[in-house]
Image (cartoon, rainbow, N blue to C red):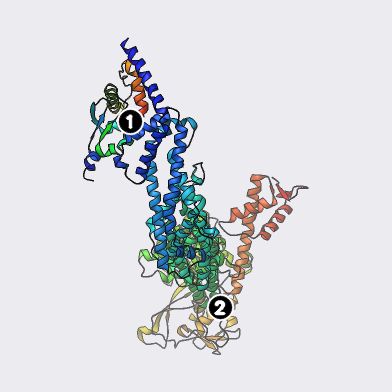
């Protein structure tokens, strides 16, 4: 009962309260209004929150919420109009307005800045005060928001008051005549932009003030709906800012272009971008960073990068003068607007190709035969080849450095650099790349790597491989390499077989098993031959033949096909060519070895290549004194055969060219060369020639030169054909022809392989796949593939698919 | 300023009912009630914030005691589950409810 009673009382009590208070709305509001004024003038500490809250609470309880709401907003509006606006307007000194409208006139930068600062400061203060006071009032009116606001779906008191600030302070009439400065907000924008402009041209501005105002704009919304993109900052300030920046950078871009220095340009732009980022962080809003970057990128990079790259001081200049840092900046700038960096890549590629073509041209010029009258340079072609390789390597080093330093190890960039290198190395105007690379390796194997540490040798090998990577016609390279390698091996010219093997294993890694198998076979042949030679020696010793005039024989047995010899002289030529007649001593040894070899490997045929071998002869000259008269002479086998003819010849007798030919059967061309080195070359003139002319002709007579003198005991004769040198034009065409012949087989094989797998295939696809299959070895040209297809059709490997368009082929099993 | 300092910092605040009962409770507990929290907001500096004392003209001692009990109860159990219900005598229900609405607890 007690509880009931108490409850009843309590229920009655508030009702009574409401009734009482309902009469009092006007009074209560007056109380609140007085209190609010106190709040707005910052005298809140005398006010009891509880009391104010209770007033508002009561008003709301008795359903006068709406009246209160309206009263509050009206009160605030009047307050803003009467007090705040006035303050702000006072800050709009005429000088500020005029300069903003007409651009800088009378007032100095400093004056304008201080005036602007004052305005920003005043506005900021007004805004800060407003915020604090509105927060307090909102607290007091919390019950209103909670009950009335929620019921009616009204925006909270706080937000409404913020909107009031926007409408009655920011959008208030500024009193200016200019339409662009009609409202306080527009003036604010203009001032901020002006200050930013000042900062851009190097002045110091008060960033904090601007930031505060920007914060205000970020906190206010264009309309009632408070979505992100409705913030005043985004709807009002940002577009202006971006537009102004665009104008500014357009102008700056033009000015920088006029200065015409790509280096300062990229430095400046990089600096500008950093500045803008910094500005967004410290002065404006982070959300603008991206947009302003876009503006700068568009105006200063995307629209201009091409011109900058092509400037006199552009990419070309930077590459040529190793300006890696500015080039790096330029790269970064390009990367900003274009992930593929098309323009920059194009410029760099062009430069590579230009430089490469220069190298090519220089080599072609250097390898031209000297004009008549000029002294002939020995091994001119080879020297040109070596120079070419060195030049290319230094070019490569240069661009590697650029790639590392300036292009930030960009993968795509590397690909395009590589492509450009490949382009000029394989350029159609310069077709000797493969040969030159092989010559470079040859030179190093014979001389270059002497006295080098393992590391240095490694470097050389790496370089060679690097170049090799660029070469498209790997088969051509293989051909040359085989040729050069075989000479090195047969002539014992290699400094280190280990290094040779290293080179091969590197090629294997780079180009695959297929490529090196024949090269490896060559090494195997050499090893086997060594065994054979010692085996033969033992065989002779065991036979106990006491022939003292026996000649020592070191033999190289080479598998035909793996060595380029058989290609040198084609099969038919071999068959028709008369066999060289060996002197009896040598012929006996030769026969012995042949017998020995047959016991080991029955059924194998040995073809002798006297043009590849060398011989050591000990010659005694009559005219010399003491030991000086005895010379050890190393010479080609042919020379040995020729000299042995003179062994038993009386001193005053001579042999004519025709005689020698008849007695030896050496092919005339070879014979001529041998005689030239024996009878013309001054250091090794073991034969005398009549008449004494430079050229050897058919009618010449030869005597043994008993009066031969030399300061050395050991001599070497006839290196003319022994050295690996660059080919002459004619030789090169031959090589290419041979190479084309071997390509024909490869292409046919590839086509058949593909067709066997696919059975039917369209023409285009067949071309593509064939090129793909062969890409590792060489780049086949389309006409050649086409002619092979025709050929295969004729030989009934393939047939055309009737009536198909585009053309297609079918495999005939 | 010197006067204000202690109230801003002090850990305890005083709640006063309309019939003169004073309850000294922890500030953290008091702040659970939205109204009290705003009342004491040092930034806004109302009289209550300055003195650290809140008078409630429409809540009597019995109810305010219940309110304080609840504030402590809430503070104690805020991170727990399966909390036993707080006991509120039936006869006080309505008044406590109104107080809660007023204080926005």
Residue A398, given in percent of the width and then of the height, sits at 45, 68
Q: Is residue A512 above or below residue A651?
A: above
Instruction: Please indicate whether residue A812 sits to the left or right of residue A327 in the image.
Output: right
Give the quarter of the figure containing the N terminus of chain A. Answer: top left
Q: Which residue is mark 1?
A: B33
| Crowd class of label 1 (few under 14; some 14 to 19; many from 20; radius 10 Å) | some
Comparing A643 with A404, the one in front is A404
Total tally of numbered discs in the picture: 2
Badge 1 marks a residue whose secondary structure is loop
Q: Is residue A227 above or below residue A108?
A: above
Comparing A427 with A278, the one in front is A278
Q: Residue furthest right?
A: A803
Q: Which residue is mark 2?
A: A365
Badge 2 marks a residue whose secondary structure is helix
Residue A690, given in percent of the width and then of the height, sits at 55, 89
Q: Residue furthest top?
A: A1
Residue A530, given in percent of the width and then of the height, sits at 43, 62
Q: CA distance from mark 2 to mark 1?
A: 96 Å
């Amino acid at each position: 009962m007690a509880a009931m009673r108490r409850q009843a009382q309590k229920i009655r009590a508030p009702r009574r309260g409401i009734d009482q208070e309902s009469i009092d709305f006007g009074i209560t509001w007056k109380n609140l209004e007085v209190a609010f004024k106190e709040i707005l003038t910052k005298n809140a500490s005398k006010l009891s929150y509880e009391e104010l809250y209770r007033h508002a609470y009561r008003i709301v309880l008795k359903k006068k919420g709406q009246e209160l709401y309206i009263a509050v907003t009206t009160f605030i509006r009047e307050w803003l109009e009467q007090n705040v606006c006035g303050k702000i307007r006072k800050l709009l000194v005429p000088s500020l307005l005029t300069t903003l409208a007409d651009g800088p006139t009378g007032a100095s930068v400093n004056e304008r800045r201080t005036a602007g600062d004052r305005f920003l400061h005043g506005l900021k203060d007004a805004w800060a005060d407003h915020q604090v006071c509105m927060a307090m009032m909102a607290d007091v009116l919390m019950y209103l928001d909670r009950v009335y606001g929620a019921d009616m779906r009204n925006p909270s008191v706080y937000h409404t008051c913020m909107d009031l600030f926007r409408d009655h302070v920011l959008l208030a009439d500024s009193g200016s005549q200019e339409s662009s400065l009609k409202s306080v907000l527009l003036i604010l924008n203009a001032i901020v932009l002006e200050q930013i402009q000042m900062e851009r041209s190097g002045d110091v501005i008060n960033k904090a003030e601007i930031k505060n105002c920007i914060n205000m704009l970020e906190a206010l919304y264009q309309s009632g709906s408070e979505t992100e993109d409705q913030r005043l900052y985004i709807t009002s300030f940002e577009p202006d800012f971006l537009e102004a920046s665009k104008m500014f950078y357009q102008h700056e871009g033009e000015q920088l272009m006029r200065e015409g220095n790509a280096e300062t340009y990229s430095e400046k732009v990089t600096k500008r971008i950093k500045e803008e980022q910094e500005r967004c962080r410290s002065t404006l809003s982070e959300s603008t960073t991206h947009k302003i970057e876009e503006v700068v990128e568009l105006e200063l990079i995307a629209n201009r990068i091409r011109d900058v790259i092509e400037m006199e001081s552009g990419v070309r200049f930077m590459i040529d003068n190793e300006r890696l840092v500015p080039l790096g900046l330029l790269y970064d700038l390009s990367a900003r607007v274009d992930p593929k960096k098309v323009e920059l890549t194009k410029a760099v590629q062009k430069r590579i190709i230009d430089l490469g073509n220069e190298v090519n041209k220089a080599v072609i010029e250097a390898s031209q035969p000297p004009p008549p009258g000029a002294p002939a340079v020995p091994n001119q072609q080879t020297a040109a080849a070596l120079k070419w390789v060195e030049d290319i390597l230094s070019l490569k080093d240069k661009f590697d450095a650029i790639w590392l330093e300036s292009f930030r190890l960009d993968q795509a960039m590397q690909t395009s650099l590589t492509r450009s290198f490949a382009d000029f190395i394989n350029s159609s105007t310069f077709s000797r790349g493969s040969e030159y690379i092989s010559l470079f390796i040859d030179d190093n194997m014979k001389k270059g790597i002497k006295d080098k540490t393992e590391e240095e040798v490694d470097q050389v090998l790496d370089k060679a491989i690097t170049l090799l990577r660029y070469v498209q016609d790997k088969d051509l390279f293989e051909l040359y390499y085989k040729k050069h390698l075989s000479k090195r091996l047969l002539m014992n010219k290699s400094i280190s077989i280990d290094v040779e093997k290293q080179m091969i294993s590197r090629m294997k890694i780079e180009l695959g098993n297929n490529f090196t198998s024949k090269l490896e076979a060559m090494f195997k042949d050499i090893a086997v031959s060594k065994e054979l030679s010692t085996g033969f020696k033992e065989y002779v010793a065991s036979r106990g033949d006491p022939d003292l005039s026996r000649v020592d024989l070191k033999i190289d047995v080479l598998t035909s096909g793996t060595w380029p010899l058989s290609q040198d002289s084609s099969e038919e030529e071999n068959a028709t060519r008369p066999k060289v007649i060996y002197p009896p001593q040598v012929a006996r040894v030769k026969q012995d070895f042949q017998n020995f070899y047959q016991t080991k490997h029955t059924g194998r045929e040995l073809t002798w290549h006297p043009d590849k071998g060398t011989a050591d002869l000990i010659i005694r000259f009559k005219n010399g004194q003491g030991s000086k008269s005895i010379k050890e002479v190393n010479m080609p086998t042919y020379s040995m055969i020729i000299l042995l003819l003179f062994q038993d010849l009386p001193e005053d007798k001579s042999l004519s060219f025709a005689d020698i030919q008849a007695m030896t059967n050496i092919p005339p061309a070879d014979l001529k060369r041998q005689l030239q080195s024996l009878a013309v070359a001054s250091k090794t003139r073991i034969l005398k020639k009549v008449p004494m002319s430079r050229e050897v002709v058919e009618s010449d007579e030869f005597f043994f030169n008993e009066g031969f003198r030399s300061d050395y005991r050991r001599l070497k004769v006839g290196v003319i054909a022994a050295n690996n040198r660059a080919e002459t034009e004619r030789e090169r065409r031959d090589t290419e022809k041979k190479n084309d012949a071997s390509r024909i087989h490869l292409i046919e094989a590839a086509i058949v392989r593909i067709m066997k797998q696919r059975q039917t295939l369209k023409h285009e696809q067949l071309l593509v796949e064939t090129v793909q299959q062969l890409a590792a070895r060489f780049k086949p040209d389309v006409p050649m593939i086409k002619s092979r297809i025709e050929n295969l059709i004729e030989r009934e490997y393939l047939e055309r698919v009737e009536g198909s368009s585009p053309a297609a082929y079918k495999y005939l099993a | 300023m010197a006067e204000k300092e202690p109230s801003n910092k002090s850990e305890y605040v005083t709640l006063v009912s309309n019939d003169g009962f004073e309850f000294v409770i922890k500030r953290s507990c008091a702040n659970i009630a939205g109204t009290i929290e705003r009342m004491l907001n040092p930034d806004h500096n109302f009289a209550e914030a300055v003195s650290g004392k809140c008078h409630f003209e429409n809540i009597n001692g019995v109810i305010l005691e219940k309110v304080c009990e609840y504030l402590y109860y809430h503070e104690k159990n805020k991170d727990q589950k399966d909390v036993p219900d707080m006991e509120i005598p039936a006869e006080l229900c309505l008044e406590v409810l109104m107080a809660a609405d007023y204080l926005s607890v």
